[in-house]
Image: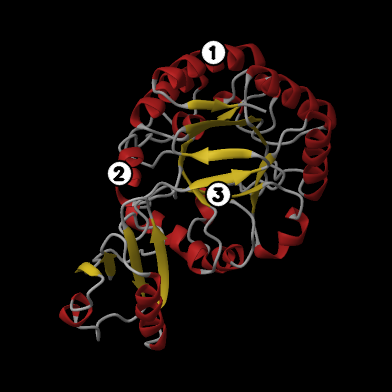
C-alpha cells in the first residue's frame, strides 16, 4: 500500500501516522521528494481500511500496490536511485562502463587490460575470478588467486572492481571488492541473495536466462528486503529459439525496468550476442533505450582467451567502441563517468 501525503504536512502529524503504522507491525519505506512525500507500507496490509487512512487530514490519497515487489517498486520510490561507489555515481544522469576480461587469467593480462580500458574511458574494471561454467571440465577461474590479481590491478590503476560471487560462503573473500556481481545462473539463489541483503556491498544483479521481469525484480527485492538497497539491475540477454546469437538482448527490458523500478539498469551486450561484431550496435541501442551503463568484455588477446573469446573485444576495438559510446552518451544528455 502507498500513502501519498499532502504538501507541507506538519512533521508531528507525519510522525504520529508513521508510529501508527509501526504499531501495526508494518515496515515503512519513507520517500520525501521536492513536491511529494510517499509512505510505502510493506507487510500484511489486507487488514487496513483505505478509507480510515484517507481520513487523516495530512493524507492526499491511498492506493493499493498489486505488484509483489515493494522496495524496488517505483510507486514506493518515485525518484531514480543513484548509487555511489568509490566516488562514482551510478544511475539517472550518469553513465558508467564496466570493462575487462571474462576471466582473470594472469597478472600480466589483467594489468594490461586494466590500464587500457581505463585509458579508453571505462569507469570500472570487471573480471571473473570464480566462473560458473556449464561443463565441469571448462576453465573455472583462478578463484581466490584471481581476486588477488583483480585487487592488484585496482591498486595499480585506481579502478574500482566488479566481480562475480558464486556462494555466500565466499563473502569474506569479497571484503575489498567494490561491487559484487550476481550472475544469471544465481539470480534465484535465494540463500545467496539473503546474505547479500545483510551486507553493505553494492550488488550488480544479472537477469536469469529465462526469467520474466517480475522474477528479476523479485530477486532484487530479496536483497533490498534484507536491508541492502544498493542494487543495480543488469540485462544480459534471454534465451530464445534463435541459434545464430548466444542470447537475445531484451532491449525492451530497459524502459520496462525504468517504468516499474527506481533501480539503475546496466546492459551487457557481450553476453547478449556472444559475438564481438554486435557489441557496438547493441551498446548504442542500449544507450538510446535509457540504460545507465554498459558491461563490456575486453581482452588483450581474445583468440587465446580461456573463456568467451568470441564475444570479447580486443583492446583497439574497445577503444573504437568507447569513442562511439562517448558520443552517444553526450547526445543523450548524460555524463560519462570515467576512472
* Res 244 visible: no
Which SS class for mark 1?
Answer: helix
Residue at left offset 78%, top offset 26%: 109
Comparing labels 1 and 3, the label whose residue is closer to the camera: 1
Q: How is the image coloured?
A: secondary structure
* Res 38 visible: yes
Which residue position is annotated with label 2? Answer: 256
**x and y percentages locating residue 317 in the rendered image:** 59, 13
Q: Whole-Å distance between the Cαs marked 1 and 3?
A: 28 Å
Residue at left offset 64%, top offset 17%: 120
Q: Whole-Å distance between the Cαs marked 2 and 1?
A: 28 Å
Query: Image quadrant of residue 88?
Result: top right
Above or below, 222 against 270 in this view is: below
Comparing labels 2 and 3, the label whose residue is closer to the camera: 2
Which residue position is annotated with label 3? Answer: 183
> 10 Å neighbourhood of mark 1: few (<14), some, or many (≥20)?
few
**x and y percentages locating residue 137 in the rendered image:** 68, 45
Q: Is residue 104 left or right of residue 54?
A: right
Q: Whole-Å distance between the Cαs marked 2 and 3?
A: 21 Å
Which SS class for mark 2?
Answer: helix
N-term-proximal mark, 2 vs 3: 3
Query: Image quadrant of residue 311?
Result: top right
**x and y percentages locating residue 108 in the rendered image:** 83, 26
> 10 Å neighbourhood of mark 2: few (<14), some, or many (≥20)?
few
Q: Nearer the viewer, residue 261 or 77?
A: 77
Labelled disc at residue 285: none
Labelled disc at residue 323: 1
Amino acid at each position: 500500500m502507498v500513502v501519498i501525503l499532502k504538501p507541507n504536512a506538519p512533521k508531528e502529524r507525519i510522525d504520529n501516522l508513521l508510529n501508527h503504522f509501526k504499531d501495526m507491525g508494518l515496515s515503512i519505506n519513507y520517500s520525501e521528494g521536492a513536491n511529494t512525500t510517499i509512505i510505502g507500507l510493506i507487510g500484511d496490509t489486507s487488514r487496513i481500511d483505505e478509507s480510515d487512512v484517507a481520513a487523516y487530514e495530512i493524507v492526499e490519497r491511498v492506493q493499493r500496490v498489486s505488484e509483489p515487489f515493494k522496495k524496488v517498486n517505483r510507486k514506493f520510490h518515485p525518484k531514480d536511485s543513484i548509487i555511489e561507489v568509490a566516488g562514482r555515481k551510478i544511475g539517472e544522469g550518469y553513465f558508467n562502463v564496466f570493462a575487462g576480461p571474462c576471466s582473470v587469467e594472469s597478472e600480466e593480462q589483467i594489468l594490461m587490460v586494466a590500464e587500457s580500458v581505463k585509458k579508453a574511458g571505462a569507469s570500472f574494471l570487471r573480471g571473473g575470478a570464480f566462473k560458473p561454467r556449464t561443463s565441469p571440465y571448462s576453465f573455472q577461474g583462478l578463484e581466490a588467486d584471481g581476486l588477488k590479481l583483480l585487487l592488484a590491478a585496482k591498486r595499480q590503476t585506481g579502478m574500482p572492481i566488479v566481480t562475480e560471487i558464486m556462494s555466500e560462503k565466499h563473502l569474506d573473500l569479497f571484503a575489498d571488492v567494490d561491487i559484487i556481481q550476481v550472475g544469471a545462473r544465481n539470480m534465484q539463489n535465494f540463500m545467496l541473495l539473503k546474505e547479500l541483503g545483510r551486507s553493505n556491498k553494492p550488488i550488480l544483479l544479472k537477469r536469469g536466462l529465462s526469467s520474466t521481469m517480475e522474477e528479476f525484480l523479485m530477486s532484487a527485492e530479496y536483497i533490498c528486503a534484507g536491508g541492502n538497497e544498493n542494487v543495480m539491475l543488469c540485462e544480459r540477454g534471454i534465451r530464445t529459439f534463435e541459434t545464430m546469437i548466444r542470447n537475445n538482448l531484451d532491449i525492451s527490458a530497459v524502459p520496462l525496468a525504468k517504468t516499474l523500478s527506481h533501480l539503475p539498469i546496466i546492459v551487457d551486450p557481450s553476453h547478449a550476442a556472444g559475438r564481438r561484431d554486435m557489441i557496438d550496435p547493441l551498446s548504442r541501442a542500449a544507450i538510446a533505450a535509457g540504460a545507465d551503463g554498459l558491461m563490456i568484455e575486453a581482452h588483450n588477446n581474445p583468440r587465446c582467451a580461456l573463456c568467451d573469446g568470441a564475444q570479447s573485444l580486443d583492446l583497439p576495438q574497445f577503444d573504437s567502441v568507447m569513442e562511439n559510446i562517448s558520443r552517444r552518451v553526450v547526445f543523450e544528455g548524460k555524463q560519462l563517468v570515467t576512472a
